Image (cartoon, grey):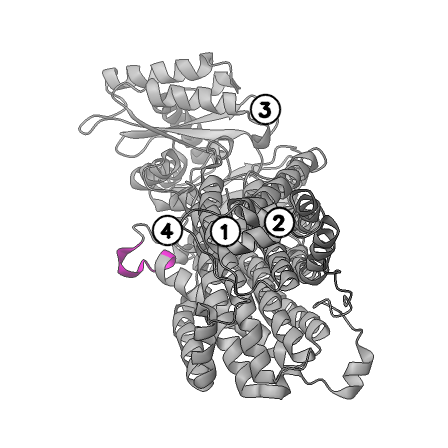
Amino acid sequence: MAPTHRRHGSRSGKPVTTLSNNFTIPGLESIEAQDEIKERFNTSDDALTAPTAKVIVQAPEGKTLEDSDVSADVDKLVTSLKDSGKLKDTDELVNPVMAAMGMKQQLTEQKAAQGIPQEQIDADLKAISPLSEDKRTGTIDITFDAEKAADVTSEQRNAITTIVSNDNGNLTTAYSGNAFQDSESLGMQSELIGITVAAVVLIITFGSLVAAGLPLLTAVVGVAFGLMGVTAATGFTDSINSMTPTLASMIGLAVGIDYALFILSRFRSELIDHINGHDLTPKQLSTRLREISREDRAHLAGLAVGKAGSAVVFAGLTVLIALAALTIVNISFLSAMALAAAATVAVAVLVAITLLPAILGLVGTRVFSVTAPFVTAPDPEQEKPTMGLRWIRQVRSRPLVFLGAGALVLILLAIPAMNLRLSMPTDGVTEPGSPRRVAYEMTEEAFGPGRNSPMIAVVDATSTPEDQRIQNFGAAVEKLQGTDGVNNAQIIALNDAQDTAQVLITPEYGATDERTSDLLHDLRNNADNYKITGVGPMFEDISQRLNDALLPYLAVVLSLAFVLLMLVFRSIWVPLIATLGFALTVAATFGLTVLIWQQGFAGLVSDPQPLISFLPIMLVGIVFGLAMDYQVFLVSRMREGYVHGKTAGNAVAHGFKHGARVVTAAALIMISVFAAFMLIDEKFIVVMGFALAVAVFFDAFIVRMTIIPATMFLLDDRAWRLPRWLDRMIPHVDIEGESLTRKAPVH
């Protein structure tokens, strides 16, 4: 689930998930204003983390909550809530009709004494009343018996949701609020689907059941240890939310299979090369593999890890750096997700270069000797053309055409990204029909859209003479009320010193309406003695912070990619085209995601909404690592051929022939793993899974397997050149295992 700020307990339109009470973002006006409220009003209560919620009740069509039979149903519901034993402050739980009557009497007397006209009093009451104007819909505020929302247990939530669902009589009921935000269970369904598809791809790739099972085994082990670490970390920080392990498992599972696949594929190549079994049938190959001695087998396993393992370590390092760099945004939940995913990737790398070789030493050549029925995996080492070789020959014959076509497709797909809209998740973007979405829509229909998007103006009169402060507050209210887009503005609290006021602002628009963001900017542009806070402004500030950080982060990532690839491949052109290709991948992914999920292209999505604010920057970090994986896996074999004397063109073709099958398998596995997460009933995870799957497809098949080789054919020898002065400066990184020249003895 997507992590967000807490919503004020007295309002609907709350965020989808939790954040810790440590959640701070320095420099945001909304956060600073919230801190001022806590300090000046001498309260430790934080509306962002309060264990509050709201129950929405609605009378049947043609009736009101004042009707005796309907009122009896509401009273029964209230009694059940009081008797649940899961709530505190139960004395404050009352029928919305009674609550509205009490509020009307109290506030009318207070405001009339202040000389406020009756018309304004009526407008103020309408803006905050728990009973709708037609008396058909009401709200009941509840507080769970917990210190904060994150402490509310599943038992407590389930008890209340059961009451709300079952004890409703003729009422239509729904619920929303901080305390209900973790009610969904993400489960393991998506992981199992991803693993199943990955198993099929691996069987086809290797033609062996044992070989197919090893990457799955090591990936699951890596994810298990990674998630154990995430769980342990919850004892030291409360920034970890329910979505963090989901993202960690998604990334860890994908890269874990990927890295094991690469090493295992290289081990197979070393075995075949050792016995010169390039043209053997699967049955003949199985027989010859069993004849390899234990000593030779161990050496070949070490050779495979020495060659492919270096690429795995580098690829893993790029993912680690890209994810860890997300901490520079300085948003706690984003940092927690990024570091958890990075730690899981680190474990996946360690498992791939330690546990996998150990298993290979134990199982030996039986890894490939147990063939899968009806599956014949072609050997890339064979002289006869593979599908990869046939494709690269087509690219080599017309490199400019393939380069132009690939780039054009991605550029066209990127165009919708110019209309990208970002927002933090509210109930208004949850799945239609869910209790939270129902509560949001009921509130909007009964009370107006602005009830779902309240703002708080903290008016500071500390520098104003005491006898002028009330007048100052009144002037602020008048100024706020006169702003286009404001439905109502009223003072809801004064501190003991009478030098600070809280003004509740009810917009004319809903939480998901772009005009609400425009209103916030207008209010702040015209501000003199007040600051704006509230969940909506906090969401807007977070979105702005993330949006401002996206381009600098992208620049850092691209620069990092260039330097690392230059170091590895000792080339200027290789890292340049790799980073440009990555930029095209990201742009096209953003464009297609906006087109489908935000704009609702062709009706593919029934409920198009703005994208979650932190999705783009998370996507950049994750996709960067994956893109570099494919770049290293594919181009390292090209460079290996070039440094061993092949011509530039033949080296590209030869490397592509050997690397294409592995990259294809890895991409298909990653696509299946990410796409499987679209089955989770959580909008952010669904969109993230879609975007990652699309990004992998674009990067693997269009960028790495089309644009990159086409460009390298055009560059020819220039692709591998490095200025002499730069060549002397940078260290040599033996990612292809050139120094591993010892051959296993032939018996």
Residue ID for mark 4: 509
Which of the two discs, 3 and 4, labels the residue nearer the N terminus?
Answer: 3
Quadrant of the rendered structure where residue 228 is? top right
**Cα gap from disc 4 to disc 1, whole angstroms:** 52 Å
Amino acid type for the residue under numbered disc 4: Tyr
Region in magenta: 597-604
Q: Residue at x 57, y 39 (%)?
A: 48
Q: Position of residue 683 (x, y in %)?
A: 42, 46
Asked whether, in this view, residue 369 is left or right of residue 324, the answer is left
Element type at mark 2? helix
Mark whose residue sits in front, 3 or 4: 3
In this orientation, does residue 32 appear?
A: no
Is residue 480 magenta-colored?
no
From the top left corner, tell me how far across and down residue 606 is, in percent: 29, 50
The residue pinned by badge 1 equals: 202
Marks 2 and 1 close (CB-CB < 8 Å): no
- Predominant secondary structure in magenta? helix
**Mark drawn on residue 290:** 2
Q: CA distance from mark 2 to mark 1?
A: 21 Å
Q: Nearer the viewer, mark 2 or mark 1?
A: 2
Instruction: Single out the residue that lies furthest toward the left.
Output: 62
Instruction: Please tell me whether mark 1 sits on a helix, a strand or a loop.
Output: helix
Q: Quick one: label 2, few (<14), some, or many (20+) residues within 10 Å? A: some
Ranked by sequence position, the earlier of labels 2 and 3 is: 3
Q: Mark 4 or 1, which is nearer the eye?
A: 1
Disc assigned to residue 146: 3
Q: Total label count? A: 4
- Closer to the chain start, of discs 2 and 4, is 2
- The numbered dot on residue 165 is none
Q: Residue 134 placed where, x, y %?
A: 25, 33
Nearest the eye: 28 or 339? 339
